[in-house]
Image (tube, grey):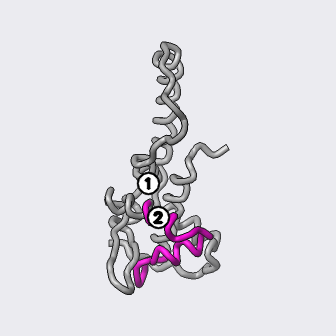
């Protein structure tokens, strides 16, 4: 069972993909969407959210696209999940339950579990995920280990 929303999972995958492919040129949303079998419009709002919080930067122009705004080792999966979930709205679920059970028992436990989950994601850097992707040759290239760390 995956506890992340699809949006959060996609955000992590998009950032790692961009980290792996943004050299020598930024990654176009169209190419990113093609690698993940998604319509480009589906990604644009997510990518713009990641730009707004400083995880990605957008490059304009005919050869534009997205690249990391910070070093791989300075971006964690927790950062990405927080960014991806900050702008989502729980549509169609109706009002949140209002009761002492939720407020005093269930809510605090769920909040503690969520904090522990995010703390674990804060220990996972984009650098680590890139290394694992390269080691597993997930995009078919096994020998590219160029490091552009600043």
Q: Residue, x 57% and y 52% (percent of image)?
A: 6
Element class at badge 1: helix
Specify the label residue 135 is tagged with: none
Q: Which residue is mark 2?
A: 15
Q: Which residues are magenta?
A: 21-45
Q: Position of residue 88 (x, y in %)?
A: 45, 47
Q: Residue, x 51% and y 19% (percent of image)?
A: 102
Q: Nearer the viewer, residue 104 or 137?
A: 104
Q: Is residue 130 above or below residue 12?
A: below
Residue closest to the far top? 100
- In what quadrant of the picture does the C terminus appear? bottom left
Q: Which residue is mark 1?
A: 80
Looking at marks 1 and 2 on the same chain, the residue that comes earlier in the sequence is marked by 2
Q: Position of residue 52 (x, y in %)?
A: 32, 59
Q: CA distance from mark 1 to mark 2?
A: 8 Å
Residue closest to the far bottom? 62
Query: Is 76 a magenta residue?
Result: no
Q: Position of residue 7 (x, y in %)?
A: 52, 54
Element class at badge 2: helix
Left or right: where 114 falls relative to 140:
left
- In what quadrant of the picture does the N terminus appear? top right
Q: Residue, x 47% and y 30% (percent of image)?
A: 111
Query: Is 28 a magenta residue?
Result: yes
Q: Is residue 69 above or below residue 139?
A: above
Q: Are marks 1 and 2 in contact (CB under 8 Å)?
A: yes
Q: Nearer the viewer, residue 19 or 53?
A: 53
Left or right: where 144 falls relative to 84:
right
């Amino acid at each position: 069972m995956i506890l992340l929303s699809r949006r959060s999972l996609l955000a992590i995958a998009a950032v790692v993909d961009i980290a792996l492919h943004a050299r020598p040129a930024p990654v176009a949303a169209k190419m990113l969407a093609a690698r993940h079998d998604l319509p480009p419009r589906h990604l644009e709002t997510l990518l713009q959210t990641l730009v707004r919080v400083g995880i990605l930067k957008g490059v304009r122009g005919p050869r534009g696209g997205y690249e990391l705004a910070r070093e791989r080792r300075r971006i964690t999966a927790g950062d990405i999940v927080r960014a991806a979930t900050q702008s989502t709205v729980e549509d169609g679920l109706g009002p949140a339950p209002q009761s002492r059970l939720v407020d005093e028992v269930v809510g605090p436990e769920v909040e503690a579990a969520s904090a522990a989950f995010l703390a674990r994601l804060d220990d996972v850097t984009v650098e680590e995920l890139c290394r694992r992707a390269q080691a597993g040759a997930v995009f078919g290239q096994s020998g590219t280990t160029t490091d552009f760390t600043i």
